[in-house]
């Protein structure tokens, strides 16, 4: 295992790009709120694909560095998990359509389509009990961090109350308040 550190310019690029992804993810969440329902389809898709494309840029920068330093292509392909790659240009797959059907309570897929039934079942899980029930602590904290970070960066903490559920807004305000002044690390 290679124990060399990531070169500083690459590290800086990765941090910048990941920050952009976080901002796009916050926008995806923002456009799910009822007060801006008119634009939710367009903006959630645009921001989600922006986040995805930016993470692809991160992956490709790191991959280019690995390739430059002599990593074998089969190792690189394994790390990039290329078998999982799916093109958005192909549009939603049948399993995506079945998952939405399960979420919305549409008719069950034919008996002979195991994969479609599995996706349908996942969609039902989002709609019924498990996956869409009460927000778990980790999801709530993640949402609050994203919203609090965005509010602090835009210097608009007051806006949190206008579009978030009160419990998320309260936690997001706490996150934003911690971010008010940078805390310097104590040196010993």
Image: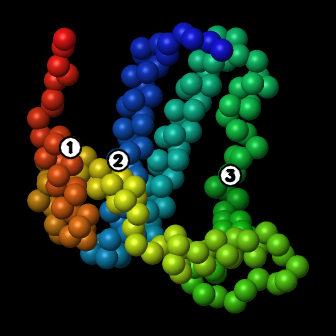
Q: Nearer the viewer, mark 2 or mark 3?
A: 2
Give the x, y percent position of residue 88.
Answer: 64, 55
Distance CA(mark 2)–CA(mark 3): 23 Å
Residue at x 84% of width, y 75% of height: 113
The answer to which image quadrant residue 172 occupies is bottom left
Q: Nearer the viewer, mark 1 or mark 3?
A: 1
In-front residue for pair 115/65: 115
- Up the image or down, 33 lies above or below 28; here it is below
Quadrant (top left/top right/bottom left/bottom right) for the N terminus: top right
Question: In this image, 163 relative to 156: left or right?
Answer: right
The answer to which image quadrant residue 168 occupies is bottom left
Q: Is residue 26 visible to us here? A: no
- Up the image or down, 179 lies above or below 168; here it is above
Distance CA(mark 1)–CA(mark 3): 33 Å
Q: Is residue 183 visible to us here? A: yes
Give the x, y percent position of residue 164.
Answer: 25, 68
- Color encoding of the figure: rainbow
Q: How many marks?
A: 3
Residue at x 11% of width, y 35% of height: 181
Which residue carries the number 2 mark?
23
Mark number for residue 18? none
Distance CA(mark 2)–CA(mark 1): 10 Å
Secondary structure category for the residue under label 2: helix
Mark number for residue 87? 3
Mark number for residue 153? 1
Most extreme residue toward the bottom is 107
Decide which of tag 1 and tag 3 comes sooner along the chain.
3
Give the x, y percent position of residue 173.
Answer: 17, 55
Whether pointer 2 and pointer 1 mark residues with C-beta atoms closer than 8 Å, the reply is yes
Question: In this image, 107 relative to 32: left or right?
Answer: right
In-front residue for pair 62/89: 62
């Amino acid at each position: 295992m290679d124990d060399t550190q990531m070169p500083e310019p690459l590290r800086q690029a990765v941090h910048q790009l990941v920050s952009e992804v976080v901002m796009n993810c916050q926008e995806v969440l923002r456009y799910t709120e009822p007060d801006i329902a008119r634009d939710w389809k367009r903006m959630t898709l645009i921001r989600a694909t922006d986040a995805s494309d930016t993470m692809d840029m991160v992956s490709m920068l790191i991959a280019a560095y690995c390739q430059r330093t002599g990593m074998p292509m089969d190792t690189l392909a394994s790390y990039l998990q290329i078998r999982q790659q799916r093109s958005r240009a192909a549009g939603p797959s049948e399993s995506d359509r079945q998952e939405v059907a399960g979420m919305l309570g549409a008719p069950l897929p034919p008996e002979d389509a195991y994969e479609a039934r599995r996706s349908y079942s996942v969609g039902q899980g989002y709609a019924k009990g498990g996956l869409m029930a009460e927000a778990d602590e980790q999801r709530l904290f993640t949402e609050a961090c994203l919203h609090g970070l965005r509010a602090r960066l835009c210097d608009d903490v007051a806006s949190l109350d206008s579009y978030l559920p009160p419990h998320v807004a309260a936690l997001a305000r706490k996150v934003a308040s911690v971010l008010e002044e940078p805390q310097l690390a104590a040196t010993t």
